[in-house]
């Protein structure tokens, strides 16, 4: 019998990095996501095939049950396979029935967005696996990839959320977020995917400076989540960028690439890659395309 699971992609609007230290973050689930399909097979093996948004296969492998049970590591060229085994091994420790009560599986994943966009290839996978095996997705994330878990909350919810870690436990508040000026908001892909793990590691190196910033970010998050004034929204985003710029000791993305932009550009998630948010009075599509950034998506096409 075939089973299919689906999880939403994500964009982190406020709270990047400092969400790890308990700051409130505003996160939005996207109209893009990932499907996971499970079929019974044999040979005590998982035949795994992953499709990109255009139907092309970007990963395919045979994973014997024994490799999962033994947490086998393959050569570095099999990095994706090793990562998958790590997730499935942790899932096995949490619920081993899927190995001991099956003869094998044919598993396919299919993205509805290009995998290099950074909208949650890993988080949607982990949440789908957790749905399949009836696991706590946050626990599975903690034991495999790590991270704050806001992306899992987006995977599981169809509305905007305020996300916070309190005593290392995820607190998710569903909110209505659809300000009157969403037609002024665009998401721009920076033509490169940022490595979230390395970005978080870099942030943790500077963590000593962070405590006084959490309250400031909380205030900004509340403003961004609830204001209906585009100017107040834009100024709050700008303040957020300045705060994180000081913590990370990096230029803001607007200073680095878009200093002449008439509006505000804000990094989303890991600084230096994936998507940025742009808010301006005029449609900025031509501005970004002239500078080589061809993926410019209006708010209404991106956000659930």
Image (cartoon, grey):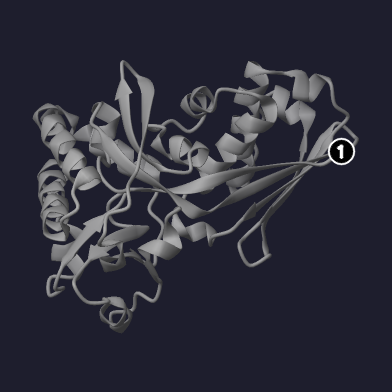
Q: Crowding near pointer 1: few (<14 within 10 Å), some, many (20+)?
A: few
Q: Secondary structure at mark 1?
A: loop
Q: Residue at x 82, y 35 (%)?
A: 45
**Can residue 83 be seen from the camera position used here?**
no
- Front residue of this view, candidates 58 and 101: 101
Task: Estimate the x, y position of residue 243 in percent, counting from the top left.
Answer: 11, 44
Residue 186's quadrant in the figure? bottom left
Number of numbered discs overlaid on the protein picture: 1
**Can residue 23 be seen from the camera position used here?**
yes
Task: Estimate the x, y position of residue 220 in percent, counting from the top left.
Answer: 15, 42
Q: Residue at x 39, y 36 (%)?
A: 150
Residue 169 lies left or right of residue 16; in this view the side is right
Q: Residue at x 16, y 45 (%)?
A: 244
- Residue 145's place in the image compared with 279, above or below, is above
Q: Residue at x 42, y 43 (%)?
A: 159
Residue 52's quadrant in the figure? bottom right
- Front residue of this view, candidates 198 and 184: 184
Residue 131 lies left or right of residue 201; in this view the side is right
Task: Estimate the x, y position of residue 128 in percent, counting from the top left.
Answer: 62, 38
- Residue 101's place in the image compared with 79, above or below, is above
Residue 157 lies left or right of residue 217; in this view the side is right
Task: Estimate the x, y position of residue 17 in percent, counting from the top left.
Answer: 27, 38
Image quadrant for the N terminus?
top right
Which residue lies under the disc numbered 1? 1
């Amino acid at each position: 019998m075939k089973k299919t699971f689906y999880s939403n992609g994500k964009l982190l609007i406020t709270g990047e990095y400092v969400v790890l230290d308990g700051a409130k973050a505003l996160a939005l689930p996207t109209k893009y996501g990932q499907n996971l399909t499970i079929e019974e097979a044999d040979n005590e093996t998982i035949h795994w095939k992953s499709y990109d948004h255009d139907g092309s296969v970007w990963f395919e492998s045979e994973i014997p049950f024994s490799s999962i049970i033994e947490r086998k590591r393959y050569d570095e060229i099999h990095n994706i396979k090793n990562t998958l085994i790590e997730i499935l091994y942790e899932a096995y420790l949490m619920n081993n029935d899927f190995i001991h009560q099956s003869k094998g599986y044919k598993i396919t994943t299919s993205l509805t967005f290009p995998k290099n966009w950074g909208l949650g290839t890993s988080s949607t996978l982990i949440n789908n696996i957790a749905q399949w095996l009836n696991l706590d997705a946050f626990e599975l994330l903690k034991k495999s990839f790590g991270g704050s878990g806001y992306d899992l909350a987006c995977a599981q919810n169809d509305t905007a959320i305020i996300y916070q870690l309190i005593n290392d436990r995820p607190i998710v508040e569903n909110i209505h977020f659809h300000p009157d000026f969403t037609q002024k908001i665009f998401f721009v892909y920076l033509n490169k995917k940022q490595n979230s793990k390395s970005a978080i590691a870099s942030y943790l190196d500077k963590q000593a400076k962070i405590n006084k910033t959490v309250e400031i970010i909380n205030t900004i998050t509340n403003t961004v989540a609830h204001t209906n004034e585009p100017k107040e929204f834009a100024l709050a985003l700008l303040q957020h960028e300045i705060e994180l710029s000081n913590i990370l000791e990096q230029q803001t993305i607007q200073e680095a690439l878009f200093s002449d932009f008439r509006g505000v550009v804000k990094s989303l998630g890991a600084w230096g890659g994936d998507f940025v948010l742009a808010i301006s009075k005029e449609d900025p599509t031509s501005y970004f395309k002239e500078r080589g950034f061809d993926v410019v998506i209006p708010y209404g096409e991106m956000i659930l």
